[in-house]
Amino acid sequence: MGNLHRTQIYIEEDQMHQLKLEAEREHLAVSKLIRHAIDRLLKTRANNIDWDRDPLTKAIGKIKLTVTNAAVDHDHYLYGRRKRR
């Protein structure tokens, strides 16, 4: 597990009651149950991205660069300054 960040949320009393029941059934802490639910939500959203409608995806292969080091020196080409080393 990575670094955890403390946060505070407000939930309805009935939601908390249901979370506690579910956490007890799963033998998990409520906080871990919430993290699992967030993971499922984010994975579902990531899987539902319509890449065919994404403007950056549409640009793949259509941009012709005259430089060969764009990946390394992108700051210079985008913002006019060299990458910090």
Image (tube, rainbow, N blue to C red):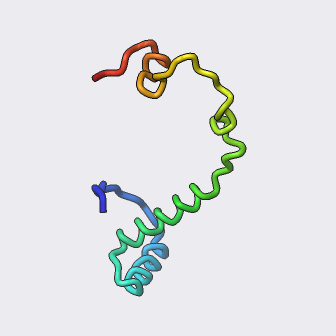
Of 39 and 66, the residue lying toward us: 66
Quadrant that contains the N terminus:
bottom left
Dividing the picture into quadrants, the one containing residue 56 is top right
Q: Nearer the viewer, residue 53 or 38?
A: 53
Instruction: State the image coordinates of residue 75 (x, y, percent, origin top left).
Output: 43, 21
Q: Is residue 3 left or right of residue 58?
A: left
Quadrant for the C terminus, please.
top left
Residue 13 pos. (x, y %): 45, 73
User: Residue 53, percent across and down?
Assistant: 71, 43
Quick check: 47 left or right of 2? right
Q: Is residue 1 above or below residue 83?
A: below
Q: Residue furthest right?
A: 53
Q: Say which quarter of the image contains residue 20.
A: bottom left
Q: Residue furthest bottom?
A: 25
Using the image as rendered, state which of residue 76 and residue 71 is in the foreground.
71
Q: Residue at (40%, 65%) from the top-left corner?
A: 35
Q: Is residue 45 left or right of residue 1?
A: right
Residue at image location 66% in from the left, 47% down from the top = 51
Residue 54 is situated, as x and y percent measured from the top left of the image, at: 67, 41
Q: Is residue 41 above or below residue 26?
A: above
Q: Residue at x 48, y 17 (%)?
A: 77
Residue extending furthest toward the front: 68
